[in-house]
Image (tube, helix red, strand yellow):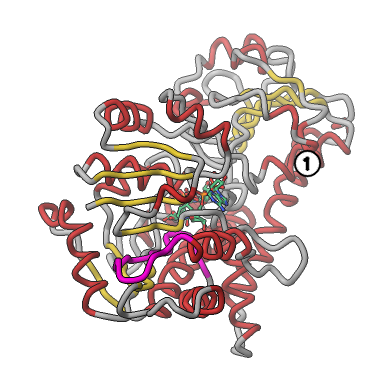
Amino acid sequence: MKIAVIGAGYVGLVTAACFSEFGFQVKCIDRDKGKIKSLKKNIIPIYEPGLIDLVKKNNDSNYLSFSANISDVTDAKVIFIAVGTPTARRGNGEADLKYVYKVCKELSVLLKKGKPKLIITKSTVPVGTGKKIKEKFEQYRNDLIFNKDYYIASNPEFLREGSAIEDFMRPNRVICGVSNETSIEILRELYRPLNLRETPLVFTDLESAELIKYASNAFLAMKISFINEMADLCEKTGGNVQMVAKGMGLDNRIGSKFLHPGPGFGGSCFPKDTRALYNSFKKFKVKNSLVKSTIEFNERRKLQMVSKIKKILGKNIKIKRIAFLGVTFKPNTDDLRESPSLVIIPELIKLGAIVHAHDPAYTKSFPKLKEFKKVKWFKNVFGAIKTSDLLLIHTEWNEYRGLDMNKVKKVLRQPIIFDLRNIFNKNDIQKFGLKYYGIGFK
Ligand code: NAD
Ligand code: UGA
């Protein structure tokens, strides 16, 4: 089967690479000509473990190819739309669907009658979008016959950055929102390679599939905000949030995942998707307080981290040097979208602190961000730590877990560590003569 994937970002590129690995003929299309030029030469624009090998292997064996020309979709039976759906610049947090609709408009011109195709949204889109997409196509081309020549389906993606390939190849479930039997047959054929692993393939209507994606992200985000609130209570009462999370997580009904406290959730999805879901509640006039609280708490959380740093460094935060380790929103990615560091660093700089940063996925684009303008970057982690007054762990990269604490103690100006991810054990660190602060315990 020939597949086209429109959008060569984190989701589009992984989808294209993985389907080509399954032996399908995949064309990955992006309007960004520079990106396509690089991809043709096996140069990957993003940091995603394992992706380069998969792209290279399948590009070289012609299962995967790249194009900047959307008209190259015409011989594909299945077309995935995997373009971005960021928060709209103006508005109440709703998802901006302009990229999705632009693709629909471009596709409508190219589609020919009588050659059945399945058009699948992989992008995360608000409930009702699948139906709107169909209306848009009909608006652009009233001669297209849906449920005869064309079918629309929703197949939301649940991969995580940093483990995208594993998540795509071994998903907990595949959700398919469909409106007819032919769509079910095509989707079964597409995901047959996962049958060996007995992956549940769940067929729903379009609306439920769209809602499952938002509900899943919002629920996980809510879990994080919940444990962060518990961490605050632990700090006041003498409890230890890691023990609380462990004790809660052993209950199968709760589960231990997404109960790690920290500086708040970031990334290209939880923040925007919780906002978009809250917007759907408002749009359809359904009362909601849980998603709203999750968003509001998470916004406060980042500033709360700044208050904690202020408390640790005292009034003299001005001219104090902070070694800021990890700026991405999570490890194993170079993605900075909505990373808590984008709020915390400018606040520290406003207070007069000097930020020395390090990140294993550093790229030349980092210092170009206005939030990081005054940051001094170091290639070597000890370069950032040397003569600093505080070592702050913002992202739990593996590289930081094994830091030589004798050396850390020796090169820091003040022997203080603030670990926003609790990657170290307080007692272990104190043995090196370092003062240690973490999240959710005294
Ligand atoms: P991204 O910004 O990394 O990539 C989007 C790509 O689409 C860009 O390369 C852009 O150039 C391209 N594009 C935009 N308009 C186009 C057009 N008209 N024709 C061709 N290409 C076009 O986005 P992403 O992170 O891959 O996210 C894509 C969607 O998947 C979003 O809806 C997101 O919510 C969802 N999602 C993302 C993740 C993730 O981990 N990033 C996981 C699950 C779902
Ligand atoms: C998340 C979901 O986990 C994916 O299932 C989903 O497909 C994706 O969003 C999406 O829709 O784009 P991702 O954003 O890559 O994936 O990363 P996560 O591992 O979920 O982490 C998100 C944020 O939550 C990070 O900032 C992370 O540090 C934070 N987090 C996560 C915590 O603070 N505590 C936790 O216990 C887990």
Count of number-bearing discs: 1
Q: Secondary structure at mark 1?
A: helix
Q: Is residue 358 above or below residue 32?
A: above
Q: Is residue 442 above or below residue 130?
A: above
In this orientation, does residue 408 appear?
yes
Query: In front here: 359 or 85?
Result: 85
Residue 284: which quarter of the image? bottom right
User: What amino acid does circle 1 point to?
Assistant: Lys
Query: In front here: 331 or 29?
Result: 29
Judge the density around disc 1: few (<14), some (14-19), many (≥20) Cα neighbours within 10 Å: few
In this orientation, does residue 223 appear?
no
Residue 191 locus on image (x, y percent): 21, 57
Residue 40 locus on image (x, y percent): 43, 28
Residue 70 locus on image (x, y percent): 48, 49
Q: Is residue 38 above or below residue 293?
A: above
Residue 93: which quarter of the image? bottom right
Q: Is residue 78 above or below residue 289?
A: above
Q: Residue at x 79, y 33 (%)?
A: 313
> Is residue 294 located in the magenta-colored stretch of the structure?
no
308 left or right of 325?
Answer: right
Q: Which residues are magenta?
A: 110-125
Query: In front here: 186 or 340?
Result: 186
Residue 14: which quarter of the image? top left
Query: In front here: 268 or 144?
Result: 144
In this figure, which residue is indicated by the disc labeled 1? 311
94 left or right of 181?
Answer: right
Could you tell me what secondary structure mostly forms the magenta stretch? loop
Residue 137 locus on image (x, y percent): 50, 73
> Is residue 117 located in the magenta-colored stretch of the structure?
yes
Q: Residue at x 41, y 25 (%)?
A: 42
Q: Residue at x 38, y 79 (%)?
A: 145
